[in-house]
Image (spheres, rainbow, N blue to C red):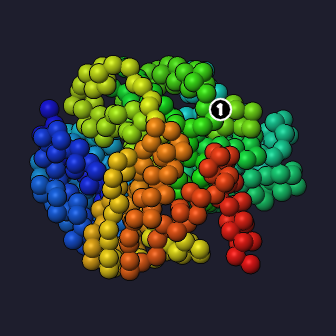
Amino acid sequence: MLQKVLIANRGEIALRVICACKDLGIRTVAIYSEADRYSLHVRFADEAVCIGPAKSALSYLNIPSVISAAEITNVDAIHPGYGFLSENSDFAEVCQASGIKFIGPKPEVTRMMGLKQIAREKMKEHGVPILPGSDGILQNAEHALEVAASIGYPVILKASAGGGGRGMRIVRAPEDLPNLFAQAQQEAENAFSNGDIYCEKFIERPRHIEFQILADEHGNVEVLGERECSVQRRHQKLIEEAPSAAVTPELRKKTAAALKKAFSAIGYTNAGTVEFLMDPSGSLYFIEVNARIQVEHPVTEFVTGVDLVKAQLRIARGEKLSDILKGPVKITGHALECRINAENPVTFAPSPGRIQALSVPGGIGVRVDTAVYNDGIIPPYYDSLVAKLITYGHDRAEAIVRMQRALDMFIIEGIHTSIPLHQQIMADEEFRAAAIDTHFIQRFLERRAKSAE
């Protein structure tokens, strides 16, 4: 039984985990940097430990400091949230060696899933569809040219250990490949200390679809439907929804069956997300596994009725999925999430600062996940997420109407936020028709700029 959990994170996800722990009667320990001394997760945890200065490398990413905080507060487990150390297999291994439960997959599974090319091979072995591409890591630019010629241009070069769009280059002609290969390799080495690159067929204007996984420690795996994450800018998601308007019940069932088989075979445990690209014909192709809870998990919670963070905690204490889920998972209604970021809605420049006025929306079908408060500070040291605004409706149209109402009622003064951008997107005809793909934002911004002339 878990009696005390340390949350190795900050902001809204740290507060989210604290709430789940309180529901289960689990005591909590917050860690915080000097910049987060007055944050709400520090206030609402049962205990709090300062682990260093504002810079992430010296606080939230400092494994010895996090482990020391866990040991001096005598916790049973650590929940990593998302970002920071959540997919760091070395951290999971240190937790294990220290006798502290890591709430996530086993270190060896996290390490395997973190190397995209290996994850790709594992999925292929168990019938999950993958894009045509290289069999293993590319040895050099000449090898990349051979692979690209065999699958046809355009292709995309990807960092095996990558994420966030780093170490990626689209190649449309063979004469461009050597230079782009060198760029991708160098960027991957700088970002991840791993310059391994692989190659895949590049899909023009795909949809970005991800499936939510839960797996217990008894070999049982469940798939809780999919999320549509195509509305993104520079590979960073802005709006997510569940379910996807493009996924048919037959495709959902077929994909879930393949994922259950694959995740059972690799010994996956706890929560995870499998990301796919969907081509214009409606076929799905695996791209990567996120071995953690996702920012956008609330939309799945709305349409399934399953508290995913509580499920993570219950899995970590040895419970079976059959006891957690209480029967087959059913998808009902539709949910949307808008990420409210501290940034200029036109230029996208960061906008840290003090919140001078705050009023969050409410009402039926509205949820706000945030750790901000009136007179609180949005520091410049971390990501710009201020809040997640989630709405639920009987169908997509109702979810959009409720999102429009909630955005209109969401007041944040003192900093710029992305609220005006989301208001414009909700009114956009292309978005309302669900005619979206990963290039939607580019087209939307072009339309916005043209209308402003």
> How many badges with numbers are in the image?
1
- Side (left or right) of 233 relative to 337: right
Task: Estimate the x, y position of residue 340 in percent, counting from the top left.
Answer: 45, 63
| Residue 167 at least partly seen | no
Residue that appears at 74% across and 38% down: 280
Give the residue type at disc 1. Leu
Residue that appears at 81% across and 36% down: 151
Placement of the C terminus among the 4 image quadrants: bottom right
Q: Which residue is mark 1?
A: 284
Q: Nearer the viewer, residue 60 or 146?
A: 60
Q: Nearer the viewer, residue 275 or 347?
A: 347
Q: Is residue 352 above or below residue 179?
A: below
Q: Nearer the viewer, residue 226 or 181?
A: 226
Q: Residues within 10 Å of mark 1 (few under 14, many from 20)?
A: many
Secondary structure under tag 1 reads: strand
Q: Is residue 25 above or below residue 371?
A: above
Residue that appears at 23% across and 26% down: 318
- Side (left or right) of 271 relative to 200: left
Task: Estimate the x, y position of residue 107 in percent, counting from the top left.
Answer: 37, 38
Residue that appears at 75% across and 57% down: 180
- Side (left or right) of 212 relative to 161: left
